[in-house]
Image (cartoon, rainbow, N blue to C red):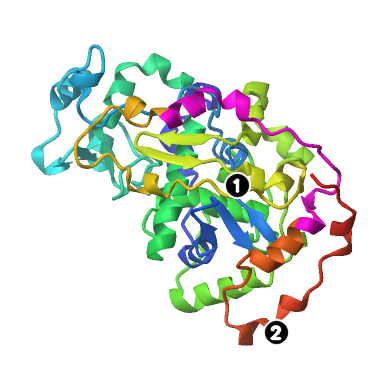
Amino acid sequence: MRRQQEMRLDERLNDRWFRLDEPLVSAFVERWRPETHTFHMPFGECTITLQDVAYQLGLPVDGRYVSGCLTDFYVYIEGGRPAWQWFHELLGMLPPANQIQKFAVNCTWFQETFGECPEGADEETLFADKSSNRIHIRWLPFVARLEEMGGYSWGSAELAWLYRCMCRVANRHVVKLAGPLQLLQSWIFWQFPAFRPTGYDAFSWPLASRWSGYNHGISEKGPRVQMARLRIDLLQARDFIWMPYSTPDVLQVVHPEVLEPRHTMLWRCVTSLIYFAVVEWHQVDRVLPQFGGVQPPPHPTLNIDFLMSKDGRGGDCWFLSHLQYWHLHWETRADHVLRFDVVDDSGPSQEFLAWWHQHGKRFLSPEVYLGDPRGIPIPVEATQRGAG
């Protein structure tokens, strides 16, 4: 990435980053359904896909899965060493004891020891641990083979971690994982113009940098969550941009590697997303309009609730064998690319909307605030779309 963008990585992700609007993000996470990996909206389903990660963060999609083990490198990896011995060999020193928590090292120690951090930059990193300010030593094998870093699917790893974070937040109704949720906020701004802040019309690459410097201000969280929830409840299909990256302005700034066929075909792939012990599911067959298609009634969901408990705790293991089925699914990803007709008027079909009005949980606000929008008929244009 440094080679492609001719900038330091910390400048890319910190100096050009933005503040998290917790009330807005909380209201959207309420709409997140872990069993479908989609947001359930009044007009249907939508979600963050590998395409969004590619455009928003500029991360490659095709490549090897990001996996391995957490600490027992000498057991599972050829040439591996005991964790802290390998750390010393690779980095030339060990952090002080007060900078270590189990097998994670404080970000501040890395910043103070190995590089300069832009003034005012946030400590959070995309792949930090749950505390958002420490880096786990699971990355040592990747540091040992820096020349291979470009061969991994960092986009799918980021999306797997974002999905897992949203599933946890949805279950606990709190927002503490600001790093990955900033991707969600950028996606909201791009897809929903009604929530887009003013004064951010210009953009460059990657697209998430468009909101650099954004700060929503300080206000009481509770009322703002209720207000955002009501605004979401009143959304209609025309308030959502199904394909925000198809405009000439975006195509002028996009990095050409993102549009290589080996990456773009995986945007429409139903497959596993892997980030060490985290395995999530790329459920794009439920959001065909985001790729120019017509959405029919969906197939039954794949139940992977049992994978939610997989976090590597309770003894380290070699995830490539422990979660082999899901790794093999990613390795055969090219066999799971969806094929469907691309139309000019992409959106939900009449059959989908009839099913959605019956089965979807479309509204979260009390009825007294809604003016009872449940009687809104299925749009006429939906009856004219194909079966998808």
* Helix, strand or loop for disc 1: helix
| The C terminus sits in image quarter | top right
Amino acid identity at mark 1: Arg
Residue shown at 47% from the left, 19% from the top = 151
Which residue is at the front of the view, 254 or 52?
Answer: 52
**Depicted 82 relative to depicted 39: above or below:** above
Callout 2 amino acid:
Gly
Residue 372, image quadrant: bottom right
Q: Is residue 345 magenta?
A: yes
Earlier residue among tags 2 and 1: 1
Q: Which residues are magenta?
A: 325-351
- In this rendered view, identify the residue nearer to me: 178 or 169: 169
Q: Is residue 241 visible?
A: yes
**Number of other residues with Cα within 10 Å of mark 2, as a class: few under 14, some 14 to 19, many 20 or more:** few
x, y (%) of residue 108? 25, 42
Residue occupied by mark 1: 210
Q: Is residue 234 left or right of residue 169?
A: right
Count the marks: 2
Residue, far bottom: 368
> For the residue labelled by badge 2, is the local secondary structure a helix, a strand or a loop?
loop
| Numbered badge on residue 371 | 2
User: Would residue 174 be visible to someone looking at this image?
Assistant: no
Q: CA distance from mark 2 to mark 1?
A: 35 Å
Q: Nearer the viewer, residue 36 or 62?
A: 36
Q: Is residue 246 left or right of residue 195?
A: right
On screen, residue 10 above or below 327: below
Point out residue 270 in the picture as x, y percentages from the top left corner.
59, 36
Instruction: Say left or right for 100 vs 330.
Output: left
Question: Decide: marks 2, 1 in contact (CB < 8 A)?
Answer: no
Residue 174: which quarter of the image?
Answer: bottom left
Query: Residue 92 falls in which quadrant of the image?
Result: top left
